[in-house]
Amino acid sequence: MKLDKIPLDIRSKSIKEAQNEIKELLEELEKKETKLEESIEKYNRMVQLNLHIHNEFKRKSKNISISGAPDKK
């Protein structure tokens, strides 16, 4: 899934906020009363949140590598 496919409300979340939402969604999915369609929507949202977290870690890692790299002379 590409970044442009991730909804804006997810892209604006911090890593911690995204992790917290995943935790909430998992708790909701563990309830037996959840309907199949709702479960699928929640699962898809978790996939998007997870991708967002992955992209944020990648971006931050790249920034650390660039700013922390010794100068080559």
Image (cartoon, rainbow, N blue to C red):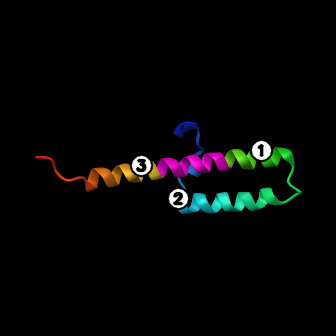
| Dots 2, 3 in contact, CB < 8 A | no
Q: Mark 2 or 1 closer to N-term? A: 2
| Secondary structure of the residue carrying numbered label 1 | helix
Residue at 39%, 52% (x, y): give it.
61
Packing grade of label 1 (10 A; few <14, some 14-19, many >=20) is few
Kindly identify the residue that appears in the image at 79 percent across and 49 percent down.
Answer: 39
Q: What distance separates the C-alpha of mark 3 from that of mark 1?
A: 29 Å
Q: Amino acid at mark 3?
A: Arg
SS for callout 2:
helix
Q: Amino acid at mark 2?
A: Ile
Q: Is residue 54 magenta?
A: yes
Q: Which stretch is magenta?
A: 46-56
Does the CB distance between marks 3 and 1 fall below 8 Å?
A: no
Q: Secondary structure of the magenta portion, mostly?
A: helix
Quadrant containing the N terminus in the rendered view: top right
The quarter of the displayed image where residue 34 is located: bottom right
Determine crowd level at label 2: few under 14, some 14-19, many 20+ residues with C-alpha closer than 10 A.
some
Judge left or right: residue 3 versus residue 62: right
Q: Is residue 63 magenta?
A: no
Badge 3 crowding class, 10 Å Cα cut-off, few under 14, some 14 to 19, many 20 or more, is: few
Circle 3 sits in a helix, a strand or a loop, which is it?
Answer: helix
Kindly identify the residue that appears in the image at 54 percent across and 48 percent down. 52
In the picture of the structure, the residue carrying the numbered disc 1 is 40
Question: Where does residue 49 sit, x and y in percent of width and height?
Answer: 60, 50
- Residue at mark 2 to residue at mark 3: CA–CA distance: 12 Å
Q: Which of marks 3 and 2 precedes in the sequence? A: 2
Residue placed under numbered mark 3 in the picture: 59
Q: Which residue is mark 2?
A: 15
Residue 35 placement (x, y as % from top left): 87, 49
